[in-house]
Structure formats: structure tokens, C-alpha cells
Image (spheres, grey):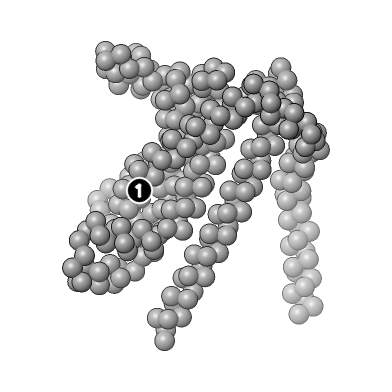
């Protein structure tokens, strides 16, 4: 027991430098402002406009990620098929691409001179440097987090449960709606939260594809970048808001993960009996 305690203490001492490296910048950030300054800055047009643009666009992008990403997640989680590794690589690619590369790629594809953008331009539809471009950049960067989490949730559903529902006469949509979705709900919620938080912090792809127009495409990260040069209070206020949102999202994800673990353990206990 004494040896184990000494080993644990040694590992803690080894871990402290990295933990301090994570903690120190966040603590210093909060000490650079006060709650009164944050509240006062919220009344500034640049702050509340950036906050409004971020909330509106991320809510739309989250809805589209749930709508369009769920079929992909179900396919990856429930089926084995040829070239599955290639599809998984394609889904994960945006998480590893530098955001500036993603933004440039989106601009070249959907800009007025791009292969798809030029077709849309004939119909009078412009995507680049509009709120739609903000949403597309957020979806491109953040949706893999939802798809990955959802696919794991779908993949953990016992096949016997689905087969039992089918034997009772349930159709494909009924099985998905009443069996699959409830059983995978925690994975879907945690993946959605993770993707939403990532979309909220998206910067590189957005500034290249959507620009930095106040009140239209300027999200909170873009306003922080501009505020760092012109008004530090704006940058500090929005940074504090993003840190709080990120911490709250992570705590919710941890709570959901705990519920998933508890549910899985109770299921295993029932099966063993």
C-alpha cells in the first residue's frame, strides 16, 4: 500500500507541469477582467452582434449536423461494408486539416468561380462571404465530432434488441424511432454538444470562406481577433464567454458519459442474471 501511494505521488508530480500549463492561461485570462467589465462590454455593439451571429449560425449548423450527420453515423455504426475505412477517413479528415486549408478549399469549391459556386451564381445564389458560408464552415469543421460520437452510440446497441422489435412487427422507421434513438440518445446529445461547442469556436475556415463582416459573418472568435488589435475589453469579454460555454459543455458531456456507463453496467448485470 505504501509503495502504491509513493508511485501515485510520483505520477502526480510528473503530471503537474502539463496540468499547470493547461490551467495557467485560463486563470490569467479571467484575472485580466472583472464581472463588472464583462457586463459592461456586453452592451457594446461589436460584442452582442458577434454573440448573436455565433448563436444563430451555430444553432442552424447544429440542426443540419443532426439531420445530415445522423444517417452517416448510423451507416458507420451499424453496418460493415466495402471501403468503410475510406469513408471513416473522409469523415475524420476535417478534424486534422488546418482550418485555413479547409476555408480555402470551401472557397475554391463554393466561391463564385468554383465548380459548384459558379453553377449557383447562375441562379443568383452566392454562398461565399455570407452567413451561409459561416454555417458551412462550422458544419465542415465540427460535424465529424457528432458523427463519431453518434456512430459509437449506434454501434453499442444490442442487435438482439433490434431483432426482437422486428419480430414483433416493427418496421424500419419504427425500430429507428422507438428503439434505436432512445438507446443512443446520450451519445447523440454528447456528440451534438461537442460539435456545437467546436462550431462556436471555429475561426480559420470561417475567416477565409465567410470573411469578417460585423453583424453578418463576424462570429465571436473573429471579433476576438479584431478586438485584440482595437479593443482588448471586447476580446476579453468574448474569450471569457467562450471559456465558460466550453467548460459547461464539457461538464455536461462528462455527466452524460457517466449516465451511459451506469446504464451499460446495469444492462450487463441484468444479462449476467
Residue 225 picture quarter: top right
Where is residue 229 shown, x and y percent of the image? 70, 18
State the residue in front, 203 or 131. 131
| Badge 1: residue crowd in 10 Å (few <14, some 14–19, many ≥20) | many
Residue most extreme to the bottom:
273
Where is residue 56 shown, x and y percent of the image? 49, 32
Where is residue 64 shown, x and y percent of the image? 38, 38
At mark 1, the secondary structure is: helix
Q: Quadrant of the N terminus?
A: bottom right
Q: Is residue 185 visible?
A: yes
| Relative vertical location of residue 106 with respect to residue 62 in this rendering, above or below | above
Q: Which residue is mark 1?
A: 70
| Relative vertical location of residue 99 with respect to residue 66 in this rendering, above or below | above
Residue 45 picture quarter: top right
Q: Quadrant of the C terminus?
A: bottom left
Residue name at image x 57 percent, y 18 percent: 214
State the residue in front, 46 or 149. 46
Where is residue 66 shown, x and y percent of the image? 39, 44
Residue name at image x 44 percent, y 20 percent: 130
Residue name at image x 75 percent, y 69 percent: 7
| Relative vertical location of residue 64 with respect to residue 219 in this rendering, above or below | below
Question: Total number of numbered labels?
Answer: 1
Viewed as shown, does residue 222 lie left or right of 11?
left
Residue name at image x 73 percent, y 33 percent: 39
Q: Is residue 96 visible?
A: no
State the residue in front, 175 or 122. 175
Amino acid at each position: 500500500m505504501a509503495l502504491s501511494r509513493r508511485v501515485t505521488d510520483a505520477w502526480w508530480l510528473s503530471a503537474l507541469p502539463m496540468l499547470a500549463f493547461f490551467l495557467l492561461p485560463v486563470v490569467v485570462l479571467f484575472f485580466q477582467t472583472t464581472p463588472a467589465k464583462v457586463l459592461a462590454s456586453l452592451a457594446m455593439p461589436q460584442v452582442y452582434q458577434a454573440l448573436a451571429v455565433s448563436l444563430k449560425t451555430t444553432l442552424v449548423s447544429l440542426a443540419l449536423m443532426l439531420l445530415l450527420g445522423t444517417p452517416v453515423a448510423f451507416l458507420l455504426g451499424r453496418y460493415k461494408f466495402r471501403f468503410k475505412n475510406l469513408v471513416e477517413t473522409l469523415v475524420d479528415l476535417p478534424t486534422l486539416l488546418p482550418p485555413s486549408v479547409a476555408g480555402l478549399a470551401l472557397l475554391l469549391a463554393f466561391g463564385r468561380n468554383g465548380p459548384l459556386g459558379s453553377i449557383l451564381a447562375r441562379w443568383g445564389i452566392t454562398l461565399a462571404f455570407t452567413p451561409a458560408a459561416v454555417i458551412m464552415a462550422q458544419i465542415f469543421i465540427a460535424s465529424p465530432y457528432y458523427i463519431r460520437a453518434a456512430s459509437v452510440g449506434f454501434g453499442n446497441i444490442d442487435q438482439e434488441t433490434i431483432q426482437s422489435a422486428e419480430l414483433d412487427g416493427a418496421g424500419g422507421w419504427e425500430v429507428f424511432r422507438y428503439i434505436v434513438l432512445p438507446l443512443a440518445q446520450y451519445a447523440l446529445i454528447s456528440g451534438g454538444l461537442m460539435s456545437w461547442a467546436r462550431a462556436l469556436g471555429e475561426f480559420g475556415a470561417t475567416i477565409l470562406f465567410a470573411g469578417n463582416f460585423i453583424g453578418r459573418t463576424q462570429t465571436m472568435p473573429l471579433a476576438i481577433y479584431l478586438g485584440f488589435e482595437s479593443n482588448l475589453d471586447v476580446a476579453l469579454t468574448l474569450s471569457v464567454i467562450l471559456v465558460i460555454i466550453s467548460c459547461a459543455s464539457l461538464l455536461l458531456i462528462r455527466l452524460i458519459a457517466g449516465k451511459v456507463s451506469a446504464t451499460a453496467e446495469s444492462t450487463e448485470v441484468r444479462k449476467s442474471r
